[in-house]
Image (tube, rainbow, N blue to C red):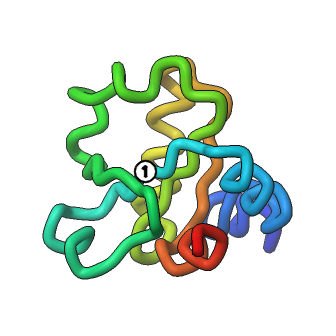
Amino acid sequence: MFDFLKNIFGGGGSQENLAQAIAEGAFLVDVRTPGEFKSGSAKGAVNIPLDSLQANLQRFKDKNKIVVFCRSGNRSAQAKAFLEKNGFQNVINGGTWQNVAQYTK
């Protein structure tokens, strides 16, 4: 059960996979609101709010690795599921923005 919850809320992969994806130049997407994004995010991240993913699918094309993240891991889990439903299989749920930020310093 813990692994299931971890996949939904905690990252969809190990911290090593997350760190490696970021080191290899993953497309970092903060799916929080613009106001939340302005208050701080991971270095190099772009802000594409969860409710704007549909309109921004073209921005994900040709990305080798995609890391989505938010405040708690809930919206990023939804974003990961949405992107996978739309054909993107290279998506990692990074969980919280602070979790992702520790690998972007």
Q: Is residue 5 left or right of residue 16?
A: left
Residue occupying the point 40% across, 75% down: 71
Give the residue at mark 1: 29
Q: Position of residue 53 (x, y in %)?
A: 30, 37
Instruction: Pick the residue in front: 58 or 11.
Output: 58
The part of the image, by quadrant, that contains residue 10 is: bottom right
Residue occupying the point 72% across, 54% down: 23
Instruction: Pick the residue in front: 51 or 102.
Output: 102
Q: Which amino acid does the dot numbered 1 rest on?
A: Val
The part of the image, by quadrant, that contains residue 34 is: bottom left
Instruction: Pick the residue in front: 43 or 31.
Output: 43
Instruction: Pick the residue in front: 1 or 80.
Output: 80
Residue occupying the point 52% across, 55% down: 77
Q: Is residue 77 left or right of residue 5?
A: left
In the displayed structure, would residue 103 be above or below residue 65? below
Q: Position of residue 29 (x, y in %)?
A: 43, 51
Residue occupying the point 20% across, 63% down: 33
User: In the rendered view of the protein, which quadrant contains the N terminus?
Assistant: bottom right
The part of the image, by quadrant, that contains residue 90 is: top right
Total number of numbered discs in the rendering: 1
The secondary structure type at the circle numbered 1 is: strand
Q: Is residue 61 left or right of residue 56?
A: right
In the displayed structure, would residue 25 be above or below residue 85? below
In the displayed structure, would residue 61 be above or below residue 54? above
